[in-house]
Image: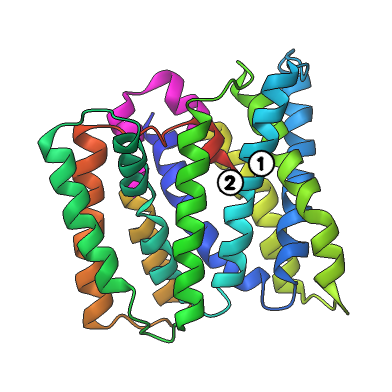
Amino acid sequence: MWTALWTVYLIWGSTYLFIAIAVRTIPPLAAVSTRFILAGAIMAAVVARRGGTLRVTRRAFVSCALIGILLPGANAVLFYAERDTPTGLASLLIASVPLWVVLMRLGTGERLPGATLAGVGVGFAGVAVLLRPSGGATAVGVGLCLVSSLMWALGSFLSARLEMPKDAFAATTWVMLCGGVAMLPFGIATAGSVSPSTESILAWLYLVTIGSVVGFTAYTWLLANAPLATVSTYAYVNPVVAILLGVVFLGESLDVQILVGAAIVVASVAVVVRREPPAATQPEEGVR
């Protein structure tokens, strides 16, 4: 269990670093659309290898298409955001997803524990601290990170309420393929003259294979074999991993504002997912 858990911690925490490297020379929409098409094709092979089926009902397919626009779409927005935002700051703003999901659950009339609501309130105070651009970030980059987190939260929230394929691997296959195909025309239109560097290509391959496929497989295994509260710890460990990798490999700096915001957001998310595991904890999150 701990091997799988640390796999999710390190892989999903590292995707922010590899996104930043990939978009140096690969246009964001081209990178993210081709990433999910190829990852979806690999996942389809995994489904076949496991003896599963990709046959789904029409309603389930429509749900996958909608979630595919939201979750891989959120990843596409993040690809753009990381051109103007340090990876550590981006990861902290994305870490607010469970907080947004709680607000969406409240909007449906669901009653939640007081500690969860307090954690959400404190968490958004931390997000507010992070919204002022710093550490090399721009207002546009920070805003895009916020849009990405909202899209991610909405996709995760809806995936728990819409009819999805029963097989989590099949569901993620269709989510990846639908999202990738939907973005491909825009990726081609905005690609221009592409001359990717070797390091960007390697980073893109890492995102396809390790980030999407290996990370998702480990996460799905954990959902079936580990306590949900334990699995949910990825929500506040991933930003810590992303911050450390950004400092070590990209030379990113941490000012007082980011450190204070980080402490508030990570602590509040820890309270929320521990006391009331968010609806965002769904297999479809494997599209990171």
Percent position of residue 163, x then y: 59, 20
> Which residue appears at 74% of the width and 12% of the height?
51
Q: Measure how far apart labels 1 and 2 are at the Cα level.
A: 6 Å
Looking at the image, residue 210 lies above or below residue 43: below
Q: Main secondary structure of the magenta part?
A: helix
To which quarter of the image does residue 134 belong?
bottom left
**Left or right relative to 280: residue 117:** left
| Label 2 crowd bin: few (<14), some (14–19), many (20+), radius 10 Å | many
> Which residue appears at 48% of the width and 43% of the height?
154
User: At numbered mark 2, what does the secondary structure look like: helix, strand or loop?
Assistant: helix
> Which residue appears at 19% of the width and 72% of the height?
260
Q: Determine if residue 213 is in view.
A: no
Q: Which residues are magenta?
A: 219-235
Foreground of the two, 74 or 9: 74
**Left or right relative to 77: residue 62:** right
Badge count:
2
**Left or right relative to 85: residue 211:** right
Looking at the image, residue 178 lies above or below residue 132: above
Q: Which residue is mark 2?
A: 71
User: At numbered mark 1, what does the secondary structure look like: helix, strand or loop?
Assistant: helix
Foreground of the two, 112 or 255: 112
What colouring method underlies this structural image? rainbow
Name of the residue lying farthest toward the top? 51
Q: Which residue is mark 1?
A: 68
Magenta stretch holds residue 9? no
Q: What's the residue type where badge 2 is placed?
A: Leu
Foreground of the two, 213 or 261: 261
Looking at the image, residue 282 lies above or below residue 190: above
Say if mark 1 contacts mark 2, CB within 8 Å.
yes
> Which residue appears at 73% of the width and 15% of the height?
57
